[in-house]
Amino acid sequence: MVTQSQTDAKCTRRSDAYRRGMRSRSVVRQNEDHDEYDRLYNGMRLEFGAVAAGQKFLVKQMADAHWRLERLKAVETALLNAPVIDFAAVERISRRQVSLENSYYRASSELRLASTAKRKPPCRVN
């Protein structure tokens, strides 16, 4: 039987994960360097030549995934260096890393596809 306090604690943990952790709505946390994130995003935007809104959206997805992946590496390292390893937490981190990597590569592929299509000359029909 699950008590009300157990249910409340579970909801609080889930809420904390969304606000502060892997699924926070804000990509850059308060203790992180916002300027560094801006440099990452602007560098990617220039690298991919993102001018249109759709291209900028894809670059933002890539920058967000990259930023969160770097954070997860630090979390994973801390978990693995703990005196007692929480293998369930490590597994959750690993699944989240795979999800972020997939997000990054999908956005990257879309950007490359769009830039290739933009460079191709139009077909002539005789």
Image (cartoon, grey):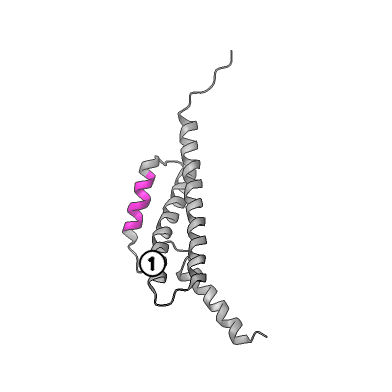
Is residue 84 among the parts visible in the rendering?
A: yes
The residue under label 1 is 77
Give coordinates of residue 124: x percent, y percent. 55, 17
Determine whether 61 is above or below 22 in the image: above
Answer with left or right where residue 42 lies relative to residue 122: left
- Please identify the residue farthest to the right as the structure is shown: 1
Q: Which residue is drawn at 52% across and 23% down?
A: 122
Q: Residue at x 51, y 69 (%)?
A: 18
- Please identify the residue farthest to the top as the structure is shown: 126
Question: In the rendered structure, does residue 34 fall within the stretch colored magenta?
Answer: no
Answer with left or right where residue 39 lies relative to residue 98: left
Question: In the rendered structure, does residue 44 fall within the stretch colored magenta?
Answer: yes
**Magenta region:** 36-45
Q: Residue at x 52, y 61 (%)?
A: 95
Determine whether 9 is above or below 81 in the image: below
Query: Which quadrant, please, contains the N terminus?
Result: bottom right
Q: Work out whether residue 20 or residue 56 is closer to the camera in this orientation and state it.
A: 20
Determine whether 22 is above or below 63 in the image: below
Q: What element carries label 1?
A: helix
Give coordinates of residue 46: x percent, y percent. 36, 43
